[in-house]
Image: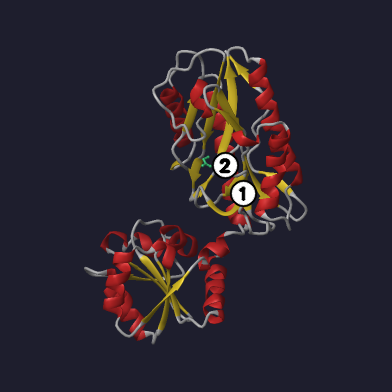
Amino acid sequence: MTNKRIAEVRNKLRDLNLDALLVTSPVNRRYLSGFTGTAGALLITLSNNWLITDFRYMTQAPLEAADFTVVEHGLKLMETVKELALSAGIVRLAFEQEHVVFSDYSVWKALLGGIQLVPESGIVEELRLIKDEAELAVMRNAAVLADITYNHILSFIKPGVSERDVALEMEMFMRRNGASSTSFETIVASGERSALPHGVASDRIIGRDEFVKLDFGAYYEGYCSDITRTVVVGTPTDKHREIYEIVLEAQLTALAGIKPGMTGREADALARDVIARHGYGECFGHGTGHGLGMEIHESPRLSKTGEIVLKPGMTVTVEPGIYIPGFGGVRIEDDIVITEDGNTLLTSSPKELRVLG
Ligand code: GLY
Ligand code: MN
C-alpha cells in the first residue's frame, strides 16, 4: 500500500518535471512512510526513498517505515538532505510550500546552493483525498469510538454537572477504549453557550431546560472522527424543538442528496437551503462540512466556496447548525464516505431529539 502511494508521488514528479520531493509535513510524512515520530523529512526521488531523522528514532523508524532507507542526520537535517540530493543528481527539488516557514526557506535556499527549490502544493494532499480500504477500516473504528462515547455520556449529563467534567469523562472514555487522543478540543456548550459554534467546554454548570451541544472526536491509529449531537436537559420548549427539527431536516436532506459528481458547494446548498427556507439562514454561518481523515479539517470543503468535485472514497462531515445568540444553538454532525452512487455513514448515533434528566 505504501508502495502505491510512493509510485503515485513519482508519477507526479515526472508530470511536473521534478527530480525529487522533500516532505516536511508530519501528516504527509506519516501517510507516505508509516513513520509516527515527531521529527524528520522524506526525500523521494525517482528511484530512492529516504527518511532522514535523528538519533531518537533510529530503532523505531526502520520498523515503521519499511519502504524507506532511514538516514540519521547530524546537527542539521538539511545538510544531510543536501548530501543525499547531490549524490542522486537532484537539480529540481520540490518542497511543500504550505508546510515551510519563511525563515526555514531562507536558510535552505542559502544552504542548497545549486539545487533548485521548487514550491509545490498539494502533491500528497491530493492523494489523501481518496481513502483506501485500509484507511476506511480505521476511520470506521474511529467513528465507532465516537458513537460509543456519545452513548456513554448520556447518563452522565445532568443539571449540576460542569461542561468541563462532561468533556473530561468523554475524553477518558475515548482513551480507555483505544483512542490515542481526541481529534480536537472537546466542545461541550450548554444553555446560552450552545449558540457558540465552537464553545469548548467551560466551567459552566449545566442547568435545566436547556440545550447541551457536544462536538468531539477520537484520534485513532492516525485518523480522526468528528461527531456532534445536541441534547436537551430538562423539558424542551417549543423553540428548542423547532430549531432542532429544522437542523435535523437540513442534515437528513444533505445526507440523502450528497453523491459523487457534485461539488462541495452543491453539497453545502442541500443543507443551507432547508435552513434558509425556514427563515434561519442568517443563523447558519459556517460550512455544511469538511473533509476528514488524518487531519480533523482537510479537503474537500462542503461550503459556499467548495470547488472540489466529490468522488467515491472521499470522507467528509455533514454538520449544519442554527445558532441564536442569547438563546442557544443546535448542530448535528455525522461522518460519511462518498460511495459510487451516494454516501454511507461512518458515525451512526441516534438523532431524534434526546431529552435527559
Ligand atoms: N467538530 C469541530 C469542527 O469541525 O470544527
Ligand atoms: Mn466537524
- Residue at horizontal 72 percent and vertical 40 percent from the top: 273
Q: Position of residue 19 (x, y in %)?
A: 45, 82
- The residue sitting at 66% across, 23% down in the picture is 353
Report the residue marked by disc 1: 303
Q: How many marks?
A: 2
Q: Are marks 1 and 2 in contact (CB under 8 Å)?
A: yes
Q: Distance between the Cα atoms at labels 1 and 2?
A: 8 Å
Write the residue at 59% across / 19% down.
232
Q: Secondary structure at mark 2?
A: loop
| In the displayed structure image, the side of residue 270 where residue 72 appears, left or right | left
Looking at the rendered structure, the secondary structure element under dot 1 is: loop
The amino acid beneath tag 2 is His
Where 38 falls versus 319 (above or below)?
below
- Tell me the residue at 57%/72% (across/down): 8
| Circle 2 residue | 286
Q: Is residue 72 visible?
A: no
Residue 26 or residue 281, whichever sits in front: 281
Return the mark for residue 353. Answer: none
Image x and y of residue 191, in percent: 51, 20
Viewer-proximal residue among 229 and 104: 104
Residue 112's image quarter?
bottom left
In the picture, the quarter occupied by the N terminus is: bottom right
x then y, percent, for residue 11? 56, 77
The three-letter amino acid code for the residue at tag 1 is Ser
- The quarter of the rendered structure image containing the C terminus is top right
Residue 336 in percent (x, y) is at 65, 46
